[in-house]
Image (cartoon, rainbow, N blue to C red):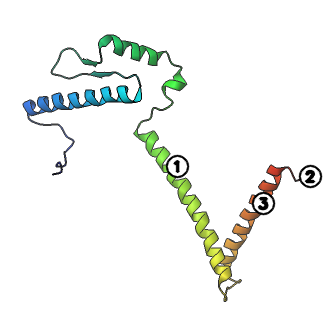
């Protein structure tokens, strides 16, 4: 039997909210423990809540201090190398999708020209198809010239 969908909003009942925090915190710390054991990484967790005056620190305050100190001693470019917020993630996804879209457009353009050339009644007077053919030919010439230059055959 599947779980029901959980709304991500503040739980209005304080006792239920406190119990949920306790369960989720235990689950998070268990996953963090598994991650450090199975993957051999160093990690720590510091959880602040309104129910305790002191934060919950995993695995211990001393070990968490060592992990944070090790992180702070890294150069700035290494600290932020893999960090990203939602904006950075969305920009990266959008650029990848734009690249994929452009490659697909190029393939479509090539296929349309090939199809047009394969048709027996190809209209060479069609301005749009002629422009597409010219564009494709220029791209192919550029590709061949780049190959020739990369092989060092051009004098």
Numbered tag placed on residue 95 in the rendering: 1
Numbered tag placed on residue 155 in the rendering: 2
- Identify the secondary structure beneath mark 1: helix
The first of marks 3 and 1 along the sequence is: 1
Q: Report the residue that reaches farthest toward the front.
A: 38
Where residue 109 appears, as percent x and y from the top left, is 62, 69
Q: Is residue 45 left or right of residue 81?
A: left
Q: Nearer the viewer, residue 44 or 102?
A: 44
The first of marks 2 and 3 along the sequence is: 3
Q: Which picture quadrant has residue 84?
A: top left
Q: Is residue 76 left or right of residue 57?
A: right
Q: What residue is disc 3 on?
A: 144
Asked whether the residues under the numbered discs 2 and 1 touch, taking CB atoms below 8 Å apart as contact, a structural biologist would say no
Q: Nearer the viewer, residue 81 or 35?
A: 35
Q: Which picture quadrant has residue 9?
A: top left
Q: Nearer the viewer, residue 38 or 95?
A: 38
Where residue 92 appears, as percent x and y from the top left, is 49, 44
**Picture layout, residue 76 above or below residue 69:** below
Q: Residue at x 56, y 54 (%)?
A: 99
- Identify the secondary structure beneath mark 3: helix
Mark 2 and mark 1: Cα distance apart in space: 38 Å
Q: Is residue 5 left or right of residue 45?
A: left
Q: Residue at x 67, y 88 (%)?
A: 120
Closest to the camera, between mark 2 and mark 1, is: 2
Density class for disc 3 (Cα within 10 Å; few <14, some 14-19, many ≥20) is few
Q: Nearer the viewer, residue 56 or 86?
A: 56
Closest to the camera, between mark 3 and mark 1, is: 3
């Amino acid at each position: 039997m599947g779980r029901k969908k959980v709304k991500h909003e503040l739980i209005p009942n304080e006792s239920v909210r406190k119990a949920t925090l306790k369960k989720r915190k235990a689950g998070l710390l268990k996953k963090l423990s598994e991650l450090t054991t199975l993957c051999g990484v160093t990690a720590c967790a510091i959880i602040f809540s309104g129910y305790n005056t002191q934060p919950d620190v995993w695995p211990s305050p001393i070990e968490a201090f060592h992990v944070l100190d090790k992180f702070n001693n890294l150069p700035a470019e290494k600290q932020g190398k893999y960090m990203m917020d939602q904006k950075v993630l969305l920009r990266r996804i959008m650029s990848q999708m734009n690249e994929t879209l452009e490659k697909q457009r190029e393939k479509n353009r090539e296929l349309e020209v090939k199809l047009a050339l394969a048709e027996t009644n190809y209209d060479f007077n069609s301005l749009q198809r002629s422009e597409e053919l010219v564009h494709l030919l220029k791209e192919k010439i550029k590709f061949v010239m780049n190959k020739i230059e990369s092989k060092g055959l051009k004098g």
